[in-house]
Amino acid sequence: MSEGDVVPAAGPVVVEAHQVPTYPPPTKLFEKHPSKPHIDGISEYESMYKESITEPEKFWGKHAREHLSWSKDFQTVHSGNLNNGDNAWFLEGELNASYNCVDRHAIKNPDKAAIIYEADEPNEG
């Protein structure tokens, strides 16, 4: 094994949301993004988390339709599993990743930068 190779854990590693520390965003973030956050608080987060675990098909289907633009709607939210190597999400659906990542935001905010290139090295780009 060479240096830097990743060795997978012997078994599944599970970390529950209540075991992970939370940190409030810095105040300066709100100066740049004064709009209302997507989630109102910890109680809404906990409710969403519970639904994502107990009713994953409903949860992910609702959020995929709410937050992404589909050129062809999906019929099946999820099929298969990791153990069989046949995981598949949003079957029968089609979307344009470029539109969802860039174009729709550029249409909504035409005067705001959509993509900012940053070179790896100072003398590049």
Image: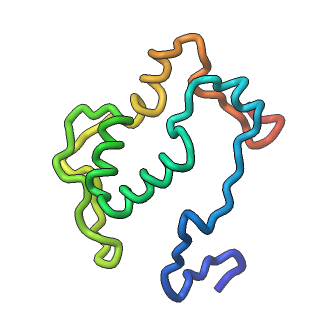
- Along the line of sight, which residue is nearer the eye, 88 or 49? 49
The image's colour scheme reads rainbow
- Residue 16 image point, x, y percent: 54, 69
22 shown above or below 39: below
- Residue 69 image point, x, y percent: 32, 31
Apparent side of residue 26 relative to residue 50 in the rendered image (left or right): right
Check the picture and name the quadrant holding the C terminus. top right
Farthest residue, direction bottom: 10
Check the picture and name the quadrant holding the N terminus. bottom right
Farthest residue, direction front: 43
- Residue 121 image point, x, y percent: 79, 41
38 shown above or below 91: above
Q: How many marks?
A: 0
Residue lying at 52% horizontally and 75% vertically, measured from the top left: 14
Residue lying at 83% horizontally and 37% vertically, measured from the top left: 122
- Along the line of sight, which residue is nearer the eye, 92 or 65? 65
2 shown above or below 66: below
Residue lying at 19% horizontally and 52% vertically, measured from the top left: 76
Farthest residue, direction right: 122
44 shown above or below 68: below
- Along the line of sight, which residue is nearer the eye, 69 or 56? 56
Apparent side of residue 111 relative to residue 105 in the rendered image (left or right): right
- Residue 96 image point, x, y percent: 34, 34
Farthest residue, direction top: 111
Residue lying at 52% horizontally and 12% vertically, measured from the top left: 110
